[in-house]
Image (spheres, helix red, strand yellow):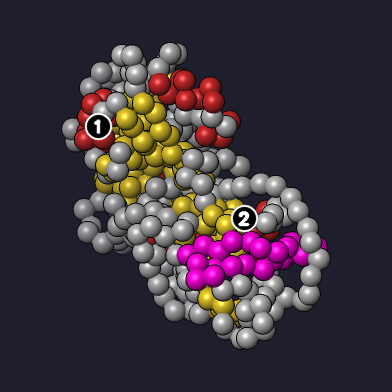
Amino acid sequence: MIRISCLACCGENDGESITNLHLTAEDSYPPQNAPVAEKLATQVPASISAPAKSAQSLQSTPFSRPLGSKQPGKPCTSRMPVLGDQVVSTGGKRTGHDTHGTPKAWVLMPWQSAKVIEVDSDGDFRLVNDSGTESGFMFRREFAYLADPNEATARYITDQSGTLIIRDSLFEVSLDLSQPGPDLGLVLDTLDPAAFEVLAVNSGVAMTYNQKVPEAKKLCFGDFIVGVNGVQNDRERMLAELKKSAVTLRVAPRIKFKVKFIKANGQTHGLVLAPQAPSQDSSTLLVREVKSGGCIDQYNRGAKAESKVQPGDRISDVNGIAGKPEVMLQELERCDDVEMTIGRPVKG
């Protein structure tokens, strides 16, 4: 029983078929162009002994991160902290004893960072916040290192209490479409046969699934579907599987990083991008090839392995322009000073 309607169009230059699963329902989870928070990395060692950790309390009041918020990277349990590390709370507003033992005198808001000033043998630490107040010892498991936008990052979501939910591994979604009722409810960019990008989760079976599972297992805007009923890297077969009465999706959350470059001496960006058809549902630019000698090739030579631009990557932002591939492409071609955000499916 078919639960989806298909919109087909062709690429302008290569005649490639682009099929998008489309629904007309207006409800979406999350909205198609909703900003997506992300999570990141860091590494190193250290130790210092010290007294017992102080108790701390967690406010479970819903919040929104203001613009300019300090974004979490890897959990502080991923490595031993060192003096000077900047950390953020993974559980909303956090309070604790100050260095004199006064309860709740030390405060860290969800959008603020604090500096590590002492580390004990367990890797737990004392912190100083933006107001200069020093804490007692805090458990490092309740913090993450401050994100570096130039390193590959995995996505995070915050729940109603502000607790950090890290989405850094593949998972499966099983959907039953055998009963009469709603359609699948997914809007997908299927330009890349290796990874269908989720543009929206509309009213339908997928949204019903989202309402029943933990945050880390929800289908979200920006996720990638890398397999359908065991079929991978085959657009037409994956689309056919999506029309069956039982569908199991292999879902890869997005990781992302920033790329900055300046065109000099007549250089071009050196990217071959998939053509954008006017009727195509898309919010990103798909990288087909990185040409030798271009700005991106030069950037790749000095970048970390996980932050090199490669075929299959998605450009989601060019100089602050997002969600409009044709405008993003114009900006990429026109400007000499470029900053863009690259996204790709998480591996493993």
Any mark on residue 181, and which?
Answer: none
Q: Residue furthest bottom?
A: 103
Seen in the picture, residue 65 relative to 57 is either above or below; the reply is: above
Residue 311 is situated, as x and y percent measured from the top left of the image, at 45, 26
Alpha carbon distance from label 1 to label 2: 36 Å
Q: Residue at x 69, y 54 (%)?
A: 82
Camera-side residue of 184 and 276: 276
Task: Give the amino acid type for the residue marked by disc 2 in the picture.
Answer: Asp
**Secondary-structure class at tag 2:** loop
Residue 200 is situated, as x and y percent measured from the top left of the image, at 32, 52
- The first of marks 1 and 2 along the sequence is 2
Q: Residue furthest left?
A: 278
**Secondary-structure class at tag 1:** helix
Residue 134 is situated, as x and y percent measured from the top left of the image, at 61, 72
Residues in magenta, as a range: 112-132
Residue 8 is situated, as x and y percent measured from the top left of the image, at 25, 34
Task: Give the left or right position of residue 215, taking residue 186 as reference.
Answer: right
Q: Residue at x 50, y 25 (%)?
A: 300
Seen in the picture, residue 29 relative to 310 is either above or below; the reply is: below
Task: Give the amino acid type for the residue marked by disc 1 in the picture.
Answer: Glu
Q: Residue at x 25, y 51 (%)?
A: 23
Camera-side residue of 113 and 296: 113
Seen in the picture, residue 42 relative to 209 is either above or below; the reply is: above
Residue 17 in view in this figure: no
**Which tag is nearer the camera, tag 1 or tag 2?**
2
113 inside magenta stretch? yes
> Can you tell which quarter of the image residue 178 is in?
bottom left
Q: Which residue is mark 1?
A: 331
Seen in the picture, residue 274 relative to 216 is either above or below; the reply is: above
Quarter containing the C terminus: top right
Q: Which residue is mark 2?
A: 85
> How dense is the environment of label 2, judged by Cα within 10 Å: few (below 14), some, or many (20 and up)?
some
